């Protein structure tokens, strides 16, 4: 009995050892791309409670995005904001905190990894009370002046807090996410649009520029850029932002599938956005497949290689390529196995394709 137990323990140790060694002996993507651009990932809070994912991050990525933890819902202290407004009568007051983001921010700081902030202004993951008098959804919406005041206080408080606790750590921000509507290709009729009006994106960039530390790169981030109608709407918005001079770059989300979008459409979109002269980043790359078969993994690898080869053509303008998550098990698209590592942190064919996209992948 004792002997069996020892054998089982030895097998577990050996197997564990082999796995760690395999993950340790693979190349480092951040080193491979160091001369070109940052190679990074989005990471959820859970990644910082797991030694395997922490080792993976240290080795592979030079920049991290908190998957959720810097979104408005996570950084705005709703109860405290409501209390201050009630006590002071100042409708523009906003209280913020970093409680959910601290594990990633601490880890990045300790390990010399940059952070890309995501996201200041978005129509999703921002509780509706943010747009109402007294933070009370049964009260009227704020008028333009008060909503701009609230936006200004929110951005200033958040920048000040980050700058005090983590000076220099957050090198860039998605200032506005997904403002262009998929149907009309004009501004989405969101609460931001309703309260502030049609220049809300420009105002958000103006305020981000005012309060972000000097040198922070400010991005507009969106999806479906490869589709011509949406691309047109995005380009029109970028033009308005460039006229005011507060935008530095465009973030392509790239939540792709093997065949969607086609590479020629994606190539046209990257070319068109690059022609604006803005910096580029791939902010949320993943490639979904239907089944976890070898054949599908190969097709997925080819798509990753195609995207990397395309961005390498624009390496001079590209600041970063970031995958949206660490392992298939942790991905928000986990049923589509979309990332570079499987649920046990083992590299998939997609990892090898990114490590050397010049190889011909079938
Ligand atoms: C968008 C957002 C991300 C994330 C994904 C998945 O791409 O920008 O923050 O929420 O959707 O939900």
Image: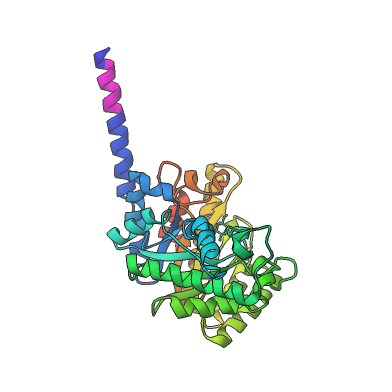
Position of 195 compared to 357: left or right? Answer: right
Q: Residue furthest top?
A: 1
Q: Residue furthest right?
A: 184
Q: Residue furthest bottom?
A: 243
Position of 203 compared to 232: left or right? Answer: left
Position of 11 compared to 231: left or right? Answer: left
236 or 31: nearer the viewer: 236
Instruction: Please state the horizontal and vertical placement of residue 263, each as a whole percent of the image.
Output: 60, 65
Q: Residue at x 46, y 77 (%)?
A: 317
Would residue 361 be seen by someone viewing this image from the given angle? no
- Range of the magenta residues? 4-11
Q: Main structural element of the magenta stretch: helix, strand or loop?
A: helix
Residue 227 is drawn in which quadrant?
Answer: bottom right
Snapshot colouring: rainbow
Instruction: Please state the horizontal and vertical placement of residue 141, each as a whole percent of the image.
Output: 67, 66
Q: Is residue 291 magenta?
A: no
Instruction: Please state the horizontal and vertical placement of residue 223, each as a whole percent of the image.
Output: 61, 64
Instruction: Please state the horizontal and vertical placement of residue 140, each as a whole percent of the image.
Output: 69, 65
Would residue 178 be seen by someone viewing this image from the given angle? yes
**Count of number-bearing discs:** 0
């Amino acid at each position: 009995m004792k002997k069996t137990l020892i054998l089982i323990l030895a097998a577990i140790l050996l197997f564990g050892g082999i796995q760690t060694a395999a993950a340790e002996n693979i190349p480092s993507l951040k080193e491979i791309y160091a001369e070109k651009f940052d190679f990074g990932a989005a990471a959820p809070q859970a990644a910082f409670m797991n030694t395997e994912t922490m080792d993976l991050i240290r080795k592979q990525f030079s920049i991290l995005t908190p998957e959720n933890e810097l979104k408005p819902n996570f950084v705005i202290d709703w109860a405290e904001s409501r209390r201050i407004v009630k006590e002071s009568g100042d409708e523009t007051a906003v209280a913020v905190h970093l409680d959910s983001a601290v594990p990633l921010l601490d880890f990045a700081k300790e390990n010399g990894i940059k952070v890309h902030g995501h996201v200041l202004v978005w129509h999703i993951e921002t509780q509706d009370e943010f747009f109402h008098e007294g933070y009370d959804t049964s009260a009227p919406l704020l008028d333009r002046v008060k909503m701009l005041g609230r936006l200004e206080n929110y951005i200033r408080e958040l920048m000040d807090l980050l700058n005090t606790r983590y000076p220099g750590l957050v090198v860039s921000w998605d200032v506005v996410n997904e403002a262009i509507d998929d149907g009309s290709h004009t501004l989405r009729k969101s609460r931001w649009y309703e309260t502030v009006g049609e220049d809300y994106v420009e105002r958000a960039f103006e305020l981000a520029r005012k309060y972000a530390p000097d040198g922070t790169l400010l991005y507009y981030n969106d999806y479906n850029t490869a589709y011509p109608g949406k691309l047109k709407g995005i380009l029109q918005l970028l033009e308005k932002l460039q006229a005011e001079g507060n935008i530095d770059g465009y973030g392509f989300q790239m939540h792709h599938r093997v065949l969607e979008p086609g590479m020629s459409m994606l190539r046209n979109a990257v070319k068109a956005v690059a022609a604006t002269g803005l910096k580029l980043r791939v902010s949320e790359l993943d490639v979904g497949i239907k089944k976890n078969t070898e054949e599908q993994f190969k097709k997925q690898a080819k798509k990753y290689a195609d995207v990397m080869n395309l961005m390498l053509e624009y390496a001079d303008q590209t600041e970063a390529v970031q995958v949206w998550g660490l392992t298939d098990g942790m991905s928000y698209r986990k049923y589509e196995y979309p990332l570079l590592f499987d649920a046990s942190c083992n590299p998939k064919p997609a990892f090898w394709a990114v490590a050397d996209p010049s190889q011909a992948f079938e």
